[in-house]
Image: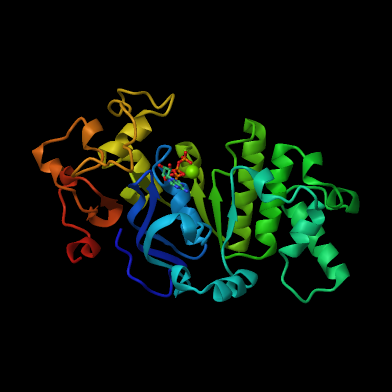
């Protein structure tokens, strides 16, 4: 969807391109993505494994080391400031203030095993608090994410916790900096079903009560349906469809989105057409034209030309010649 750049956009990603070089080839992990999150909004990002979701989100948070990149271009405006253009010094300063926070799939790799969990959450708090205030704040954030706030719990080490508890510590750390945007990259895939629901309920509650915007990256379409206002579908480093959740999930436009939904167990392949066949494209050797063409049941000669992301009325956008509408403004001019 072509959202105008204005004050009501918290995160405004414009034509983001993130390429790697691997074995002498360019891996087009993120290839011209536009994505917006408004204050207090919950946005889903879905797509099969290897579609570029993690690279996209880590780039926005400036967590991709420059050294491994072949190209990074476009803009990632957070409250109007291009995060990609910040100097290292400015980035550090911003991180200490009101930058976004991220929660990852594997909390153990982001927690320091040698430091007490309470200390780690305390470090994320704003500077200038007294010892006592810090301790109170840590207890507050622990209870907020459903952990006991007592001293004994705060003084434990990450390895003394279960996977679900560690994930909660990570969320408590993310929240301690009072972010206006929390990016959660598959925050629950490593957890068992009951704990998944608890962690998600925690995120949902914080989103609702604190007006914190959420960008949720997941394979779980039912979760997106329940939690999100809008959704972006990624395929081969590009957004192929976006729009409000109900429309996209109930009446998907792009053949890839349709396939993705039909592939969900219990959604009944056949009821919405066949599930996906074949596998995601190699990002270092992409097909010409539409990247979904080799797997698409509707592919025709026209698809040898790359379709632009076309706006399809008020319902959103789709990158398919069959969507039968005008190109979204952004894609017309180079
Ligand atoms: N440091 C890197 N160097 C080279 N290629 C990379 C690097 N990091 C990621 N990639 C490639 O970028 C592509 C996109 O990966 P990414 O992790 O963003 O996918 P994803 O959509 O998050 O998948 P999943 O759903 O499995 O998490 C993959 O082909 C991956 O191999
Ligand atoms: Mg990922």
Whether residue 302 sits left or right of residue 144 in the image: it is: left
Residue 123, percent across and down? 75, 63
Residue 290 vs residue 262, the one in the foreground: 290
Q: Residue at x 59, y 43 (%)?
A: 105
Residue 245, percent across and down? 40, 47
Quarter of the image containing the C terminus? bottom left
Quarter of the image containing the N terminus? bottom left
Answer with the quadrant where ligand 1 appears in the image.
top left
Whether residue 84 sits left or right of residue 93 in the image: it is: left
Residue 129 vs residue 322, the one in the foreground: 129
Whether residue 162 sits left or right of residue 270 in the image: it is: right
Residue 133, percent across and down? 84, 69
Q: Residue at x 80, y 53 (%)?
A: 115
The outermost residue toward the front is 24
Q: Residue at x 37, y 33 (%)?
A: 261
Say whether residue 229 is visible.
no
Q: Is residue 169 above or below residue 249?
A: below
């Amino acid at each position: 969807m072509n959202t105008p750049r204005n004050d009501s956009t918290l995160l405004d990603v414009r034509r983001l391109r993130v390429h790697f070089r691997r074995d002498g080839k360019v891996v087009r992990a993120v290839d011209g993505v536009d994505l917006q999150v408004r204050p207090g909004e919950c946005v889903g990002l879905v797509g099969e494994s290897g579609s570029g979701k993690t690279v996209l989100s880590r780039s926005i948070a400036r967590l991709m080391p420059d050294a491994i990149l072949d190209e990074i271009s476009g803009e990632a405006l957070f409250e109007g400031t291009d995060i990609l253009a910040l100097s290292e010094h400015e980035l550090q300063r911003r991180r200490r203030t009101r930058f976004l926070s991220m929660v990852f799939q594997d909390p153990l790799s982001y927690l320091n095993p040698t430091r007490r969990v309470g200390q780690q959450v305390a470090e994320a708090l704003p500077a200038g608090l007294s010892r006592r205030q810090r301790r109170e704040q840590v207890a507050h954030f622990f209870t907020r994410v459903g952990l006991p706030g007592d001293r004994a719990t705060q003084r434990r080490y990450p390895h003394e916790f279960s996977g679900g508890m560690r994930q909660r510590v990570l969320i408590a750390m993310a929240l301690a900096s009072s972010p206006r945007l929390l990016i959660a990259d598959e925050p629950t895939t490593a957890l068992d079903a009951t704990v998944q629901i608890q962690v998600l309920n925690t995120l949902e509650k914080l989103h609702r009560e604190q007006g914190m915007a959420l960008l949720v990256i997941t394979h779980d379409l039912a979760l997106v349906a329940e939690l999100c206002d809008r959704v972006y579908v990624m395929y081969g480093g590009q957004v192929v469809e976006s729009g409000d959740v109900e429309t996209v999930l109930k009446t998907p436009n792009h053949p890839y989105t349709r396939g993705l939904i039909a592939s969900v167990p219990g959604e009944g392949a056949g009821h919405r057409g066949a599930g996906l066949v074949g596998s995601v494209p190699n990002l270092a050797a992409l097909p010409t034209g539409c990247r979904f063409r080799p797997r698409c049941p509707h592919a025709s000669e026209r698809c040898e030309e790359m379709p632009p992301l076309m706006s399809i009325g008020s319902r959103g956008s789709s990158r398919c010649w069959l969507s039968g509408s005008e190109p979204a403004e952004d894609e017309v001019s180079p």
